[in-house]
Image: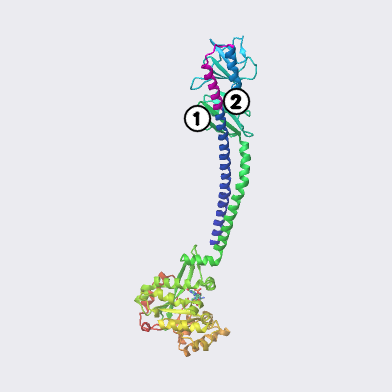
């Protein structure tokens, strides 16, 4: 279930991260491309506006010069001045002089035709009237732009208002802020340009991008078909999408790595220790002669998120291999103190057996952990019985040191699962042990014809010879209990009495048992032994 959840969550996260990474790069490339294009268009619009204002300034200055002349109109001297100003000013292509609203002479000379002054399309702040698309009657050329001030009229080729260098694809429109178009470059859609100029907000046209610049009555609009943006986008995409894909691959790789770690049993165990998912259940230990519950064995369980409890056989070996067992022993003793402190303090003949690992025995570290946990609790050291398997005694010298110290501190020490390893009578003799726990595989054979059925009586005899207390594990039937009682085995535990149960249930069991069998006989070692 947990495995499925980790895989599911990792896949969902992987998809989200990949989408976000590629999506954000996709968005970034679009954002950058359109920003860059917008900045480029603004630049061209600004240049166009400057050119238009520069051209108009030239025209105005010519008009003001002409108006300040004191020569007689249309004399050869007057015409010569007009001609000189025309040829010296780039923005002026022809000058005309009007009298009573009709053209009298131009920079070409006197004119015989009756040409009327044109109505203005646009009037500048200083009174210069501009008419777009005036057909020059003298030169008969393309439509020109006429700027009038009092009696003078200057004709200008409209392109002079927009002749800046623009990049391919960019269209430029120069107009008055009332929307009269003066000049354009690269054949823009004039209808669209007018819409843009007169709009007070951005207009949405899916086919173009544009920028508008306004100043001094002039407007410049730079327009670009969106396909140029797409080209730019393509360039940005080729830069940013690989980055997005790389980022996604990196994050997904990291997640896979983490997922693999989270799925590894060792990492799961480390997380369980950190999150305090290990719990202790208690199995009553019964004095066989009286039926009294005189102690309990603390047995570890790993609580899974779905409520399932894992037995220690599935994770203790891993903890032992990976050096986590010391932490586990620490948590077990802490839990025992937390769960049973008040019971242990009230009943000093009651004791709890805890399992110590081979490593705890070898290093003696477990003893320090236990001492720290018991300090100031009111629990006596004699109330903590240490169970170590035969594997803990392989290194006899360090085992002897640890056991001796344990005994000095007042703990009882039992050899667990006796008979399943290679411990011999002689090796046991040399160790300062208090008790032997006979493994349940031997108890199982009691009353059967199994070839090992006689082993139980041999172990019992041997333990008695060594003056060790005897605990029988895995007592499941009344006949097994009767047999053990006959052979004077003092203590038993097993499903006949109770399975390992959570602390609440255990305390109820203990209280009921005490009602049935009030305290009078002694535990393997009484409380004075501390
Ligand atoms: N079939 C049957 N089984 C019975 C009966 N009565 C008790 N048992 C089971 O026999 C095992 C007795 O514990 P153990 O010999 O100390 O053997 C323990 C002990 O060596 C180790 N262990 C348990 N808790 C800890 C711990 O906190 N630290 C360390 N280092 N090892 C632990 O894990 C082993 C297995 O523990 P559990 O799975 O809890 O299994 C327990 C218990 O639940 C019975 O009548 N019938």
Report the residue marked by disc 2: 160
Assign a secondary structure to mark 2: helix
State which region is magenta: 52-75
Q: Is residue 42 left or right of residue 294?
A: right
In this view, 473 is above or below 256: below
- Against 211, residue 503 (above or below) is below
Q: Is residue 528 visible?
A: yes
Cβ atoms under marks 1 and 2 closer than 8 Å: no
Task: Give left or right: position of 491 versus 202.
Answer: left
Query: Marks 1 and 2, how far apart in space?
Result: 28 Å
Which of the two marks, 1 or 2, is nearer to us in this view? 2
User: What is the magenta segment's predominant secondary structure?
Assistant: helix
Quarter in which the N terminus is drawn: bottom right
Q: Is residue 60 magenta?
A: yes
Residue closest to the eye, 37 or 92: 92
Q: Is residue 233 magenta?
A: no
**Residue 481 appears in the rendering:** no
For residue 409, which quarter of the picture? bottom left
Q: Could you say which is closer to the camera, residue 350 or residue 408? A: 408
Answer few, some or many: residues within 10 Å of disc 2's Cα (few below 14, many 20 plus, some between 14 and 19): many
Q: What mark, if any, has residue 200 been given in the picture?
A: 1
Q: Quadrant of the C terminus?
A: bottom left
Give the structural element (helix, strand or loop) at label 1: loop
Q: Quadrant of residue 441?
A: bottom right
Q: Earlier in the sequence, mark 1 or mark 2?
A: 2
**Which of 178/82 is in front?**
82
Residue 330 is situated, as x and y percent measured from the top left of the image, at 45, 72
Q: Is residue 239 above or below residue 320?
A: above
């Amino acid at each position: 279930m947990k495995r499925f959840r980790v895989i599911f969550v990792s896949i969902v996260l992987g998809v989200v991260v990949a989408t976000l990474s590629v999506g954000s790069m996709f968005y970034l490339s679009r954002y950058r491309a359109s920003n860059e294009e917008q900045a480029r268009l603004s630049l061209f619009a600004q240049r166009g506006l400057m050119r238009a204002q520069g051209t108009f300034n030239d025209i105005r200055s010519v008009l003001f010069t002409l108006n300040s002349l004191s020569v007689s109109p249309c004399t050869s001297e007057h015409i010569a001045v007009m001609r000189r100003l025309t040829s010296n000013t780039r923005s002026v292509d022809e000058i005309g002089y009007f009298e009573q609203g009709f053209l009298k002479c131009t920079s070409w000379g006197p004119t015989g035709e009756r040409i009327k002054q044109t109505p203005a399309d646009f009037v500048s702040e200083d009174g210069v009237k501009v008419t777009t698309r005036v057909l020059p009657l003298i030169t008969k050329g393309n439509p020109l732009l006429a700027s009038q001030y009092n009696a003078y009229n200057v004709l200008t080729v409209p392109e002079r208002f927009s002749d800046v260098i623009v990049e391919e694809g960019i269209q430029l429109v120069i107009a008055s802020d009332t929307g009269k178009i003066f000049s354009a470059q690269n054949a823009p859609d004039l209808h669209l340009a007018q819409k843009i100029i007169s709009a007070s907000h951005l207009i949405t046209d899916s086919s173009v991008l544009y920028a508008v610049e306004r100043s001094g009555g002039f407007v410049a609009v730079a327009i670009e078909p969106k396909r140029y943006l797409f080209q730019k986008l393509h360039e940005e995409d080729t830069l940013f999408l690989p980055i997005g894909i790389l980022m996604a691959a990196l994050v997904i790789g990291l997640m896979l790595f983490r997922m693999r770690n989270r799925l590894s049993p060792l990492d799961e165990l480390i997380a369980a220790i950190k999150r305090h998912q290990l719990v202790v259940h208690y199995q009553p230990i019964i004095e066989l002669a009286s039926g009294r519950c005189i102690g309990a064995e603390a047995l570890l369980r790993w609580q899974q998120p779905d409520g399932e409890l894992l037995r220690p056989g599935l994770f203790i070996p891993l903890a032992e291999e990976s050096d986590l067992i010391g932490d586990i022993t620490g948590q077990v003793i802490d839990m025992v103190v937390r769960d049973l402190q008040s019971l242990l303090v009230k009943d000093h003949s009651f004791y709890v057996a805890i399992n110590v690992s081979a490593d705890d025995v070898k290093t003696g570290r477990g003893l320090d952990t236990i001492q720290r946990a018991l300090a100031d609790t009111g629990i006596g050291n004699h109330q903590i019985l240490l169970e170590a398997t035969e594997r803990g005694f392989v290194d006899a010298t360090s085992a002897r040191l640890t056991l001796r110290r344990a005994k000095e501190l007042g703990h009882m020490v039992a050899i667990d699962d006796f008979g399943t390893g290679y411990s011999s009578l002689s090796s046991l003799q040399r160790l300062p042990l208090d008790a032997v726990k006979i493994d349940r595989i031997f108890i199982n054979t009691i009353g059967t014809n199994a070839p090992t059925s006689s082993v139980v009586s041999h172990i019992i005899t041997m333990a008695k010879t060594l003056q060790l207390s005897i605990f029988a594990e895995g007592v499941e039937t009344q006949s097994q209990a009767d047999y053990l009682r006959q052979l004077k085995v003092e203590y038993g535990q097993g499903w006949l009495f109770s399975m390992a149960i959570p602390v609440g249930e255990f305390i109820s069991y203990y209280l009921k048992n005490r009602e049935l069998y009030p305290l009078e006989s002694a535990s393997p070692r009484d409380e004075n032994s501390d």
